Image (cartoon, helix red, strand yellow):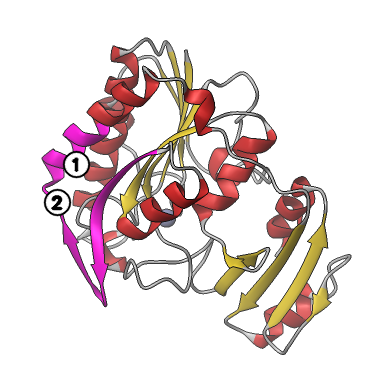
Amino acid sequence: MKIYISADIEGVTGIAHWDEAEKSKSDYQKFAKQMTNEVKAACEGAINVGADEIWIKDAHDSGRNIIAVDLPEIIRLIRGWSNHPYKMVQELDESFDALLMIGYHSFGGSSSNPLSHTISSSTFNYIKLNGEFASEFLICSYIAAMVDVPVVLVSGDEGICKEANTLNQNIKTIAVNKGVGNSVISIHPQLAIKQIKEGIESILKEDINKCKIKLPHHFKVELSYTNHWRAYKASFYPGMKQLSSTNVEFETNNYFEVLRMLLFK
Ligand SMILES: [Zn+2]
């Protein structure tokens, strides 16, 4: 069994402030360690039920957060950013049996996490896909749908877990944080690790084909920029329509074209 794990930090257990997500800040180390421990738990759970190949994308900021030496020897760890349009799920393809997302967070504009954002909080107020707020989870899930890989488990804040189960009720979700205004109410970091490990063990024993995501046939993407000049620049991308001083819209039937556009946003 070949598994792909995409890991972010803004949804790991207890995280409540940007200082805890930024490498240059002293608060960061503890959360890079927690991110590593949660990924490790997912690896161990998957190995217990037969995974013999595990690829991990370190998908936060620099792409250089996870402490590799703490992970099982069978892993392949993708660090840094290739600049391929698949970004947080770089190298995902039909050869994988399942995709897991660890440490994921609510979409830009959501009140479910003090650190909610989509792609970049400094660039975008929000991104909408077919009229709904789009999260990084949704963007990656549609990539998984494109290559026919089921999304079996998501851990992160309550908001993103709820969104995952709205998209597909069979996805195993582990809510480790509840955002309240600018605060976070979290479970114990060790309990999160236990739940992630048990969660992946139980879902991989089931028929994971029911965790496949349906890819829409048409995509209407609205980008709302924090700066009007970014929207002006984006309006020159082929097919892009300017909606207002800060918002632009892109339509296509091909999801890869959405990803290509987001690469040049
Ligand atoms: Zn991140």
Task: State the SS at label 2.
Answer: loop
> Which residue reaches farthest bottom?
245
Query: Is 133 colored magenta in this rendering?
Result: no
Magenta part of the protein: which range?
172-196
Q: Is residue 115 left or right of residue 226?
A: left
Give the residue pinned by disc 1.
192
- Residue 240, image quadrant: bottom right
- From the viewer's perspective, is residue 227 above or below residue 19? below
- From the viewer's perspective, is residue 129 above or below residue 3? below
Q: Is residue 58 left or right of residue 19?
A: right
Q: Earlier in the sequence, mark 1 or mark 2?
A: 2
Task: State the SS at label 1.
Answer: helix
- From the viewer's perspective, is residue 183 above or below residue 40? below
Residue at image location 33% in from the left, 50% down from the top: 156
Distance from Cα at disc 1 to Cα at disc 2: 7 Å
Residue 68 location in percent, x, y?
33, 30
> Could you classify mark 1 by the number of other residues whose Cα lies within 10 Å: few (under 14), some (14-19), or many (20 or more)?
many
Mark number displayed over residue 187: 2
Residue at image location 46% in from the left, 20% down from the top: 207
Q: Is residue 232 left or right of residue 150?
A: right
Hey, what amino acid is under mark 1?
Answer: Ala
Residue 124 location in percent, x, y?
57, 73
Label 2 near label 1: C-beta < 8 Å?
Answer: yes
> Closer to the camera, 106 or 74?
106
Query: Is 174 colored magenta in this rendering?
Result: yes
Can you tell me whether the CB of the residue at mark 1 lies under 8 Å from the nearest atom of ligand 1?
no
